[in-house]
Image (cartoon, rainbow, N blue to C red):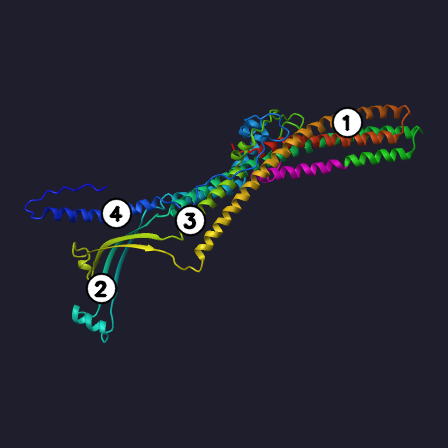
């Protein structure tokens, strides 16, 4: 509703006509502006809504629905070993993959800064000085000489132009939404790189501790093989056993001894890999605790699967890709509709440099409004719109796939934690049994109640069982780390 405008008039014989003219001018300004504001409130494209996900109520092998999760624990509190903490801290500071991911965040931040000013007008300043001398025999030359009294023309101008595109269909807002989603995507992707890095460092560290323990086991068994070889040689010299028994004992010792350089090689290669993973030159790794002394938290609560979707960074990254794809559909749709551009400018212009800044004679101005509607673009705009919708559907599938993969990884880790605990108990009993078998076989051998093959077999079986036990203990630790990572832990 337009209110009446009361205008005081002194000596005006037609006050009603004057008021009517003023009201008409007011309407001419207000109606177009109101139309622009109203149309600008329209926004093409759909607002993002998370697609429906098929999630279990709770993870497999979990008998209760605990809302807390080990993923909420900071990595420094989850990994209490000081040497491992030092390695992880170095990795976060110097790992090249993580540094590249951080640079991607910084690049995306620049895009966000640019997106914040998308709806502001553009301002350009142009200063031009031009001298033109046409031919004296040309029409321009003759006209200039007769008009100006000289054979050349000077022109100097300083012009400022401002242009603004009305965000009629919300295209610019959708572009800002796309840029922000892409920024969050890079941020979540960097967190995903860190969670994987923390897990890899911990797993490689446990692998190194396993090699240390296996080397210790092998050296201890080599000492037993040495003592058995000496005892066999003494019995041969006494005529109790044959040379074949000595040769078999020597062969068993050699089979054990060859494992030592192999394990030392594995240790050196693993140390180099850990150093490179933390952004350092290859070299030795400091460690004080062994595999047996390493303790991990026993409270392995997983939380709810629905919470894992919002906690795990790689899943969040895929969701942000979906948000960006959804916004791009709106951009592609808006490109098919009319675009309103408003341009205004002004400045100073003169044929003589001496009069360039003569005000107001050198002042000039311009204003224009353009409404451009694409008619025929060889289906380019339509095809881009259809492609954007297909890319959004593709992003939905990728998001759902990442959720399904995440649930599967958590479920697998839970199975590993449970079954490896059972394997560790059985393997421990087996090691104890075989160590007693070695002791009894050596006693029987010295009493000539057992042959050398029984002793050699018992030692070989015990060595293999102890090496397998160390491997299972390492797998237990890495399974816990994998559960921590698959739930989204490690980026805090």
Q: Which residue is mark 4?
A: 31
Q: Which residue is mark 1?
A: 430
Cα–Cα span, label 4 and label 1: 90 Å
Marks 2, 3: nearer the viewer: 3
Q: Is residue 228 visible?
A: yes
Bounds of the magenta span?
Answer: 258-285
Cα–Cα span, label 3 and label 1: 67 Å
Helix, strand or loop status at disc 1: helix
Kindly identify which numbered label has been placed on residue 154: 2
Cα–Cα span, label 4 and label 3: 27 Å
Q: Earlier in the sequence, mark 4 or mark 1?
A: 4
10 Å neighbourhood of mark 2: few (<14), some, or many (≥20)?
A: few
Helix, strand or loop status at disc 3: helix
Cα–Cα span, label 2 and label 4: 44 Å
Helix, strand or loop status at disc 2: strand
User: In the image, residue 412 lies at what x, y percent?
Assistant: 64, 34
Which residue shows up at 68% across the image and 27% down it? Answer: 421
Q: Which residue is mark 3?
A: 331
Which residue shows up at 18% across the image and 71% down it? Answer: 145
10 Å neighbourhood of mark 4: few (<14), some, or many (≥20)?
A: few
Marks 4, 1: nearer the viewer: 4
Magenta stretch holds residue 282: yes
- Magenta-drawn stretch, dominant element (helix, strand or loop): helix
Which residue shows up at 25% across the image and 67% down it? Answer: 132
Q: Is residue 98 left or right of residue 420?
A: left
How many marks do you count on the picture? 4
10 Å neighbourhood of mark 3: few (<14), some, or many (≥20)?
A: many
Q: Is residue 149 left or right of residue 100?
A: left
Q: Earlier in the sequence, mark 4 or mark 3?
A: 4
User: In the image, residue 458 lies at what x, y percent?
Assistant: 82, 29
Magenta stretch holds residue 2: no
User: In the image, residue 446 lies at what x, y percent?
Assistant: 88, 24
């Amino acid at each position: 509703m337009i209110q009446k405008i009361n205008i005081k008039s002194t000596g005006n014989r037609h006050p009603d006509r004057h008021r009517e003219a003023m009201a008409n001018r007011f309407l001419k300004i207000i109606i177009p502006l109101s139309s622009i504001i109203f149309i600008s409130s329209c926004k093409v494209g759909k607002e993002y809504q998370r697609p429906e996900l098929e999630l279990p109520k709770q993870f497999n092998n979990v008998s209760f629905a605990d809302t807390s999760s080990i993923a909420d624990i900071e990595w420094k509190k989850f990994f209490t070993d000081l040497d491992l903490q030092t390695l992880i801290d170095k990795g976060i500071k110097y790992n090249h993959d993580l540094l590249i991911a951080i640079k991607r965040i910084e690049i995306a931040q620049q895009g966000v800064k640019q997106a914040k000013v998308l709806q502001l007008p553009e301002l350009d300043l142009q200063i031009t000085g031009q001298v033109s001398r046409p031919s004296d025999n040309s029409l321009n030359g003759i006209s200039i000489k007769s008009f100006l009294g000289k054979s050349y023309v000077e022109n100097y101008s300083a012009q400022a132009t401002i242009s603004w595109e009305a965000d009629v269909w919300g295209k610019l807002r959708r572009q800002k939404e796309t840029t922000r989603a892409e920024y969050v995507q890079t941020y979540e992707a960097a967190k995903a790189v860190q969670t994987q890095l923390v897990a890899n460092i911990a797993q490689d560290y446990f692998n190194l501790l396993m090699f240390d323990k296996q080397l210790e086991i092998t050296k201890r068994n080599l000492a037993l093989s040495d003592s058995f070889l000496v005892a066999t040689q003494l019995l041969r010299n006494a005529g109790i056993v044959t040379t074949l028994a000595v040769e078999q004992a020597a062969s068993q010792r050699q089979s054990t001894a060859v494992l030592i350089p192999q394990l030392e090689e594995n240790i050196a290669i693993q140390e180099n890999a850990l150093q490179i993973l933390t952004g350092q030159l290859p070299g030795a790794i400091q460690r004080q605790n062994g595999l047996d002394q390493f303790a991990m938290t026993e409270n392995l609560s997983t939380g709810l699967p629905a919470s894992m979707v919002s906690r795990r960074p790689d899943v969040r990254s895929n969701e942000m890709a979906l948000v960006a794809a959804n916004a791009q559909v709106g951009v592609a749709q808006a490109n098919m509709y009319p675009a309103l551009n408003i341009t205004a400018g002004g400045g100073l212009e003169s044929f003589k440099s001496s009069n360039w800044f003569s005000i107001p004679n050198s002042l000039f101005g311009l204003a224009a409004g353009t409404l451009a509607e694409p008619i025929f673009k060889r289906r380019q705009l339509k095809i881009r719109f259809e492609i954007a919708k297909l890319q959004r559907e593709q992003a939905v599938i990728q998001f759902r796939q990442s959720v399904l993969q995440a649930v599967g990884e958590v479920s697998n880790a839970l199975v590993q934690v449970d079954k490896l605990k059972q394997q560790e108990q059985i393997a421990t009993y087996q090691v104890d049994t075989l160590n007693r078998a070695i002791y009894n076989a050596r006693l029987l051998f010295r009493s000539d109640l057992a042959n050398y093959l029984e002793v050699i077999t018992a030692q070989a079986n015990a060595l293999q069982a102890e090496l397998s036990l160390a491997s299972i203990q390492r797998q237990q630790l890495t399974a816990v780390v994998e559960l921590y990572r698959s739930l989204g832990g490690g980026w805090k």
